[in-house]
Amino acid sequence: MNDNGATKRPYIICHMMASVDGRIDCDMTEKIGGDEYYDALAGLDCDSTLSGRVTMQMHYALPGTFEPRDTTPIGHESVHKAAGGGYEIATDTHGRLLWPDRTDDGQPLLVITCEDVPAEYLETLRQKGISWIATGHGHIDLGRAMELLATDFGVRRLAIVGGGHINGGFLSRGLLDEVSIVIGAGIDGRSGMTAVFDGIDDPDRPVTLLRLTGVRRIGDDSVWLRYAVR
């Protein structure tokens, strides 16, 4: 249940570091900030974090793509809990990412995918000690996945930490409770670079209104902004 008690899902915060012009390219943001992003994230008191497939491919998954020998889909909603506690969560709609065995001391991995994913992929996750949620046909049912995170995995506060398209997916489905942005002291300006929220195709979608809840200088030159989603 979220902090407001309104729905049976975690309280969800989009937390990003961006340039003054709202771009979030990782190589660029590393040049305009130090530990401010992680200091602010720690201050959000989130027990779990979630990233999209592209971000996970860049920073956490193994090289290559999963190639099933049998493409038979799981075909129904499926949940597997391999470990308890807070989670590092990846969305991977079609089950393409390769993962190492989860034997480190960090947060356990949880993969969210759709019901069209090959059953063989989920079995591979199980053998590696990785939890999963498979829900939705053709795409991940994010709303249902968030319900399952709360009821089956005990996730209370979830930080969405990248990138722009997964942020846009949560925004378009009305799943965000809060937006947390660390603005670094720099301007990107390059055309085609992903923004904090991106990938929404509906040109007539109304603007999402926010209510400012906090402004704080963080680090030497960055500003931490917090907004509640109205």
Image (tube, helix red, strand yellow):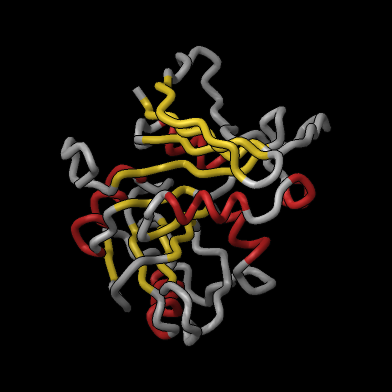
State how many labels appear.
Answer: 0
Residue ID at (40%, 48%): 140
The residue nearer to you, when weighing 36 against 73, is 36
Q: Position of residue 111 (x, y in %)?
A: 43, 64
User: Observer-nearest residue: 45 or 165?
Assistant: 45
- Please name the residue shown 57% across and 43% down the image: 16
Location of residue 78 with respect to 215 vertically, above or below: below
Is 154 above or below relative to 36?
Answer: below
Q: Residue furthest right?
A: 190
**Between 189 and 97, which is closer to the camera in this rendering?**
189
Q: Left or right: 40 with respect to 36?
A: left
Depth check: 153 or 91 in front?
153
Vertically, is 215 above or below 119?
A: above
Residue 40 position, x and y percent, is 52, 49
Is 208 on the left or on the right of 147, as rendered? right
Q: For the point 64% across and 36% down, which residue is it?
A: 183
* Horizontal and vertical percent position of residue 199: 58, 33
Q: Can you say which quadrant of the picture contains the C terminus?
A: top left
Q: Position of residue 185 (x, y in %)?
A: 74, 36
Give residue 208's quadrant in the image.
top left
Residue 130 falls left or right of residue 144: right
